[in-house]
Image (cartoon, coloured by chain):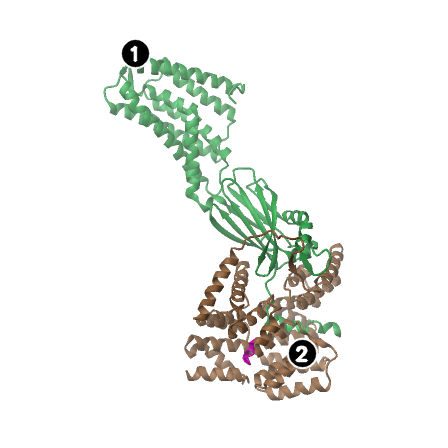
Chain colours: A brown, B green
Amino acid sequence: MRIFLKLAGAVLLWLGNAQAQPFLPTSPDSVLERLPVVTSRDDRELRQLQQQLNTAPDNIDLAITTARRLIETARKQAEPRYYGYAEAVLNRCWQLPQPPAEVLLLRATIRQHRHDFQGALADLQTILADQPAHFQARLTEAVILGVQGEYSAALRDCLLLTRLGNRQIAATCIGNIQSLNGQARPAYRYLYDIITNSPARDPEQQLWSLTVLAEIAVRLGDIKAAEAHFLTAMALAPGDVYLLSAYADFLLDQHRPTEIISLLKDHARADGLLLRLALAEQVSSAEALAGHVAELEARIAAYRQRGDAFHQREEARYSLHLLKQPEQALNLALANWQVQREPADARLVLEAALAAGAAQAKAKPVLDWIRHNQLEDTQLQALAKQLESS
Amino acid sequence: MMRHFLLIWLLLMSTAVSAHKPSDSYLLINSNEQQIQGQWDIALRDLNYAIGLDDNSDGQITWGELQHHHDNIAAYALARLSISTDNNSCSNHVTEQLVDNHSDGAYSVLRFQVSCPSPVRMLKVHYQLFFDFDLSHRGLLRMIQNGSTQTAVFSPEHRQRTFELATVSMWQEFIDFAREGIWHIWVGYDHILFLLSLLLPAVVVRKDKSWQAVEQFRPAFVEVLKIVTAFTVAHSITLSLAALSIINLPSRWVESAIAASVVIAAFNNLYPVIQKRLWICAFAFGLVHGLGFASVLTDLGLPKASLVTALVAFNVGVEIGQFAIISLFLPLAFILRGSWFYRRLTLGFGSVLIATVAMFWLLDRSLALGLLA
């Protein structure tokens, strides 16, 4: 009953919000918008680069440098606008009959960001056909194939990386894939040894390895180890959106909502983090829930208005846990399953199927997939068992 | 080597977590018969990137800073939005600038008035805000016409949309054009007088060089019906041909010919040349009057999408106007047909009066004196 009252409140708030009237601020000092701290400096540098580019539009190297800086900024600020800026900068290079490998790589990255995995893979394959030893292209392909659940192809890429230099990156790549493919414990030990005995000097590399390690520990049910890896990683990159959401998911499963709320309350701008914040508020019956659910609803509506799909994984989770509409959630989760096949995607299908009281057949592709890949994940095993006995 | 690894972390984030949606602006255009108004919500983040709003670089945009850039914002934005009708561009001017909060942050709200050469039957909206540097930006348009809403999304690939204002309510358009038709008959004295001149003798017959009242209503009614039908068919033909630009005659000739037709019709009542088959006369001159109607229709601006509707509606309006005049005239004339009043004063003196007025028009129009501007 309580949740219904809250939802009614959320709908009212949303309606009110939708009809919000433009207003005239009262004081010249009232702050309308806060920009990320780095924005102004970044923007100034980027504008300078773009001005240079405007005077020399055919300078491909300058375009690549600018686009690369823009994509880095997009990632650093978790601001998707910069992908659009990067696209505009590269647009001219894409028209070339044979774009250079760097240009294709950047396009693959942007396409991947838009979840256009096929488009991204096509660009990467063009690069690799010409330069089979292109490290970044090989790595990106491995990651995308891993997300799609193409483990043997992904593993082939990872193994090639070992011959191309960086040991830790190759090890993280291999460990990640193997852990999803029936070898979770050896993969964990292998990766753990590498990063403790010879940690990478580059914090980005270290961050990736630690996160993968934490996620393997979560799947194995080793809560203590997972927590330790998460905290080490968080110390390296406290505001990172990916890490925050992975850690928040971990805390949700550990029934520690208050920690999530204090962790995420200042990060509600990111859709994925707002979703986790609302989920935590639901568990702890926090006051702010109604407002945040309304906010999510408004954001989903805004995506729909511009003709984009809100990220299906997040929308499925929103429908399942916050809207309590398991049938709709199941459809979204199954559609998402056609695009992404990470453990989190499998889990959503199983949870939605259970909540909807759906026939086992609906979730069969996912159940078969878990068995076929010998996926070791304590949460998934429990859900699968529940579903099969129901 | 370092260069390669800059993208590693990105790989993860991009597949797993959405940050928030890319840039959008919200454009609302509200049009009705009287005016067209616009409201454009543009994100402060985008404006900050495009023209710089954070003057003191403290990572915060205040109302004071925004106000300081208001002129700049208005000029920047409106230069990237063009609204036009069939072939004329409209001008936009800002009426006020406010602030609103959307789900992803604060927006500058630009309210503006659109002035188009009237009448507006279609609107072409060309949008190119931010497309020069952001290919993921979208312009979300909500077009409200007389209460009904259409939406459109502008992208770098689709920068232009055309809205037929007529398609939204064809019925309303039909009514509008029919009303114009009625109005035109009502204020177009030349058409009324021409029709009256032809109708006046319908309730009498010429016998032994004088007018005698007809015996029965029926032949009078049939006579009127024939005349009006012939007139209607004729002017419908030329109206359509002229409105479709198949024939195009100078309006001075047409207007003069209409005046001349009234003169001739009135004189025919005084010195009858044609007594039988007056409907042929009505048909011949009806062709000329149709050309006159067409010039009105062209002035109104015909909607391309619903030309036929407009033509039919205008014609229907003209018929309704005519019918109103006849239904007043015929019973009255029939009752009075035997009286001295009708035969002398109305038919005789009336025709003289009509001929005089029409002669005056003829001179005025053919010589372009401009006495009755």
Assess whether residue A390 is covered by the magenta stretch: no
B14, A361: nearer the viewer: B14
Is residue B80 left or right of A341 when viewed as pictured? right
| Same subunit: marks 2 and 1 | no
In which quadrant of the rendered image does the N terminus of chain B lie? bottom right
Q: Amino acid at mark 2?
A: Ala
Q: Give the residue displayed 51% in from the left and 39% down from the top.
A: B34
B320, B219: nearer the viewer: B320
Residue A77: x and y, percent?
67, 66
Q: Quadrant of residue B177?
A: top left
Look at the numbered disc 1 and give the secondary structure of its residue. Answer: strand
Residue B91: x and y, percent?
60, 41
Residue A250: x and y, percent?
58, 79
In the picture shown, does residue A32 fall above or below B220? below
Residue that protrudes farthest toward the left in the picture: B215
Label 2 resides on the chain identified as A
A239, B299: nearer the viewer: A239
Label 1 resides on the chain identified as B
Q: Which mark is residue B210?
A: 1
Q: Which residue is mark 2?
A: A233
Look at the numbered disc 2 and give the secondary structure of its residue. Answer: helix
Q: Which mark is residue A23?
A: none
B25, B172: nearer the viewer: B25
Cα separation between marks 2 and 1: 116 Å
Dot 2, crowdedness within 10 Å: few (<14), some or many (≥20)? Answer: many
Q: Amino acid at mark 1?
A: Ser
In the picture shown, does residue B361 fall above or below B85? above
Residue A246: x and y, percent?
60, 76
Q: Give the residue displayed 58% in from the left and 51% down from the top.
A: B40
Q: Give the residue displayed 45% in from the left and 30% down from the top.
A: B293
Magenta highlight range: A252-257
